[in-house]
Image (cartoon, rainbow, N blue to C red):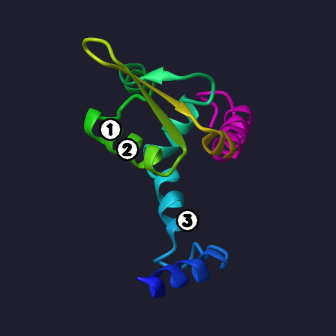
Amino acid sequence: MEGGAQHRQAEADKPYDVFHTDCPARDVVDHVTSRWGVWVLIALRSNDLRFYELRESIRGVSEKMLSQTLRALVQDGLVRREVEPTTPPQVTYGLTEFGRDVGEPLTELFDRITQRLPPRGTR
């Protein structure tokens, strides 16, 4: 038991190496850069949304994929999930401070892309 705690402590002092397959930060990067993870972070950048509002704002995502993506992002600490005890329960999603931090460069990237693209039909 004690050896495991020492092992964890030693690992806690090491920086994350996202190029290593066992790195926990790699999982977070994978979730953020997944097909739907980016869209969830962008959709939640301005305000909190309920599940159906998120699904409507991210066109093309299935309920299953949105649920899986949200579950991963909540587990990673990027998105918070608030359940109101109503019938039926109302679930609202929003960005945590970590999520806003990670989402900021994505927002900048999207803004740059949409501002720099030539007008539709001229490419």
Q: Which mark is residue 24?
A: none
For residue 103: magenta?
yes
In-front residue for pair 78/5: 5
- Ranked by sequence position, the earlier of labels 2 and 3 is 3
Q: Which mark is residue 25?
A: 3
Q: Residue at x 43, y 43 (%)?
A: 36
Q: Residue at x 29, y 35 (%)?
A: 62
Circle 1 crowding by C-alpha within 10 Å: few under 14, some 14–19, many from 20: some
Residue range of the region highlighted in magenta in the rendering: 102-123
Q: Position of residue 116 (x, y in %)?
A: 74, 37
Q: Which mark is residue 71?
A: 2
Vertical placement of 89 versus 98: above or below? above
- State the CA–CA distance, disc 1 to disc 3: 21 Å
Q: Position of residue 19 (x, y in %)?
A: 56, 77
Q: Amino acid at mark 2?
A: Arg
Vertical placement of 107 versus 35: above or below? above
Q: Residue at x 34, y 17 (%)?
A: 85
Vertical placement of 23 versus 101: above or below? below
Secondary structure of the residue carrying numbered label 3: helix
Q: Quadrant of residue 61?
A: top left
Q: Amino acid at mark 1?
A: Ser
Q: Amino acid at mark 3?
A: Ala
Q: Residue furthest bottom?
A: 3
Q: Is residue 80 left or right of residue 98?
A: left
Q: What quarter of the picture does the C terminus occupy?
A: top right
Task: Look at mark 1 in the image and give the residue it sits on.
Answer: 67
- State the CA–CA distance, disc 2 to disc 1: 6 Å
Q: Residue at x 45, y 52 (%)?
A: 34
